[in-house]
Amino acid sequence: MLEVAELSAGYLGQDVVHQVSFAVDEGEAVAVIGSNGAGKTTLFRAVCGLLRPSRGSVRLDGRPITRRRAHDIARRGLAYVPAERHLFPEMTVAENLDLGAFPNRPRAARQALVHELFPRLAERRRQRAGTLSGGEQQMVAVGRALMSEPRLLLLDEPTTGLAPTVAAAAYEALTALRGQGLTIVVAEQQVPLALAFADRGYVLESGRIQLGGGADELEDNPDVQLAYLGIT
Amino acid sequence: MIRRAATVGRVGTPAVRAYAPVVLAGGLVALLPLRYGDSRAMMGVVIGGVLFACYAVGFNVIFGSTGQLFLCTGALAGLGGYASAILSDRHGLPMVLAMLLASLMAATAGGLLSWIAVSRSLGVIFTGIVTLAFALAFQNLLLGQRDLTGGETGLIVEAGSDTLLGEVVAPFYVFVVLLTAYLALYRALQRSHVGWAFRALRDDEIAAELAGVDVKRYRVLAGTLGSGMIGLAGALYAHSEGFISPSTFSFGDVDVLVIVMLAFGGIGSLLGPVVGAAAFTVLEEWMDSFNEYRLIIYGSVILVLFLALPRGVVPTVQGLVERLRGRPGRPAAPVSPSPVDTLNPG
Amino acid sequence: MRAVVFDGVVLGLQFGLLGVGLTLVYGLGGVLNLAQGQLAVLGAIVVALRLDAGSAVVPAVLTGLLVAGTVGLALDLTLMRPVYRRTGEDRVLLGLLLMLGVAFIIDGVLVWRYPIEALTLRIGGDPIDILGVRMRTGSLLASAIALGVGAILVLFLRYAATGKAVRSVIQDEEGAQLCGVSPDKVRAFVFALSGVLAALVAVTRSMTSPVTVNAGIDFTILALIVAVVGGLGSVSGAFLAGILLGIVNTVSAHYIGTYVTTIVLLGAAAVTIVLRPSGLLGAGRE
């Protein structure tokens, strides 16, 4: 479904991500793990159109989306939930979700789905997004992405700033979404959660893919254990 | 983009080579009366050109060096001009003293504006708006306070008419000396630690602060100095011309021209003001017969200029020369960052 | 005194409308449209020309609005492209300077071709009594239009899909993109809209006093002051600021004088920037 080939991208002429290649099949759950500054966010931004790659290509369902703008890619079924969430602070939860369905996706059914997944949002429907807690904002961000009926969901460090129980709940929700056929790629620093959730994973360090394999494989890999799982 | 057009530090070059352009420019300009010395009208035009070059150097100190968009050059010059005229004519102060005091007043006004902008962390737009408000308010003050300033009809400036400044060619040389002094001052600043601080803070404010540069202090310094230079030039003009009115120093007549001249010549470069002033003085003269098209031409020049030559003539030429010599120069057009980018690696 | 205040409200509503276009364009992309006033005058002159040519009032006004809107759209689609490609202060500076150039060109063309043209719309009818003050029908119609259009605008931004898209780009451009909103299209739309609003204000102003060919710069400065005091990016802020400044304007002009009035208005803008840069109702965007 998603094919990334030799992708390089960065800022002000300096590449941060170097010749990254990976693929995601329909229905899979893939984790991209790496420490701070590894290039995960840069990679995701380049894939979803917020950043123009310097080299390489990205294909969605076989069609190239490499130089397309983010709003164009969003309309093609790829939804991105950034680490900073980028909610509309002055708008209510309902309005935020509503905009996710821009311009004319069927709203009612999707909204019911989101409310089912995140009951708290139904309660806070009329509250301004800027006044929500971190966990609630994260729910709104994911919910908003879901409103566009995406086929592929990209999440950048969805558990940042969340209490452990909330983080676990977030991954439960993602698992539920997987069950409904959504393809999910998640970038995480909280490696145990990510590997427990995903089928496959890639390790990104210094802007390059160092390792790739099944989630179990990675969990058993001694280097991964040392670097990310704190197991010596 | 525009702000990065400043010349890279020349701290290493020996003084002779560093100041050569200053002397050269001053020398060339000083030759002009040979051609135009007979005509009082033409000398007036030439003096106007040198005056605007002086304004532009002052503006360059404020905007080119520290990126503060002061939209009140005319008002600062007017403050200098009117204050000097009033102090010398009405209060009997000796002309030179009046000019210095007037320049000081302009410097204080500019320094104050800088200080306000800096302590409230005003960005480019807000600094621009605040200084524009000052400029327009000053203009209205001139028009409203008829008893003091003569209002719309203007003010005749007596002091100075019996000195050098009252003659045809002599005032020109006074202005040339002023311009050369300003250029030398600008060059000296560039070579000093002040110039280094200016470049640092314009390149990356936060990094500069962390490196120990007191950004606020240097901005206020630039604002004060540049404003004083502009005020002094305005005061000198008042006495040499013998007559000033609000339109001598209005936004449309001064600020716009100065900005365009400097942008054309090269914001932040040493000779940019001279090149720009020369080009536009010629243009103005040539356009005298096309008076109706003036605004249209200026507008078009601004558009073409900022779209095609964002760095200005001098830096672009310098870049080309360096590339021809084989040294890695800057590219002719600035590199635009990717769309919607924030510096957030990782 | 009451008459002066009422006049101030009439003026203020139009000030507000003038500031709205400017504030929206800035809120969307950081571009300060210094040609706002010229777009207004352009619209007015087109209307005047159509009236001279014998057209009826309403079609003439619509033509004027259309022309101003189209020019606004054209400006966004052409000159603003290189501006939006830059970020931060670079974008602000380039946008400022390019719009200044445009302002000169429009001003120059209008003054050159139609130096004595001016727009005056006489609205017939006897003065009507409002709360003890006799108001001219022209003033009332102008106020009604400004109020009506303002209300429609606010409702549009709150409830219409495109309106919400506009607000989304103002509040978080990246977030908007992720929702499938094209910031470029939104900006083009709003630029065109601001042209239409500017021209509309020129038309309503002409109902009480003639709008001449060189009124452009005054309109721009007014729009700027209103937008700044109201808070750049806030539509309701622009209206609130407009009304307040309108009242200040008439009261000051009546009791003190015109030169001082201009200084007072400019001072208001400067004070707002210094004390409360986000303006009366601004969203905290500098």
Image (cartoon, coloured by chain):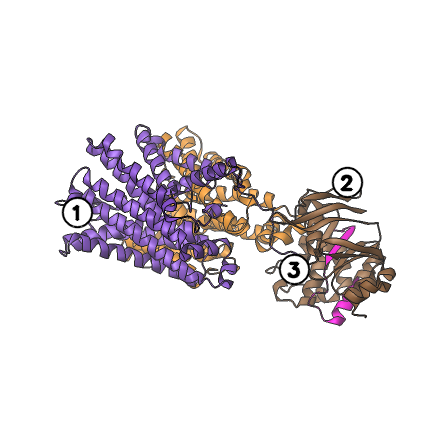
Chain colours: A brown, B purple, C orange
**Mark 3 and mark 1 residues within 8 Å of each other at the beta carbon:** no
Give the secondary structure at mark 1: loop
Q: Chain of mark 2?
A: A
Query: Which of B345 and B31 lies nearest the eye of the viewer?
Result: B31
Q: Which residues are magenta?
A: A148-173
Q: Is residue C196 left or right of residue B58?
A: right
Residue B211 visible at all:
yes
Q: Determine whether C257 is above or below B267 in the image.
A: below
How many numbered badges does the structure rendering display?
3
Residue behind mark 3 = A84
Give the quarter of the figure containing the C terminus of chain B.
Answer: bottom right
Instruction: From the top left corner, tell me how far across and down residue A228 is, in percent.
Output: 77, 65
Instruction: From the top left corner, tell me how far across and down residue B281 is, in percent.
Output: 32, 35
Give the secondary structure at mark 3: loop
Query: Which of A24 and B93 lies nearest the eye of the viewer?
Result: B93
**Mark 2 and mark 3 residues within 8 Å of each other at the beta carbon:** no
Residue A165 lies in the magenta-colored region: yes
Q: Do the residues at discs 2 and 1 belong to one chain?
A: no
Residue behind mark 2 = A63
* Image quadrant where residue A117 sits: bottom right
Q: Amino acid at mark 2?
A: Arg
Residue behind mark 1 = B157
Q: Amino acid at mark 3?
A: Glu
**Mark 2 and mark 1 residues within 8 Å of each other at the beta carbon:** no
* Image quadrant where residue C247 sits: bottom left
Give the secondary structure at mark 2: strand
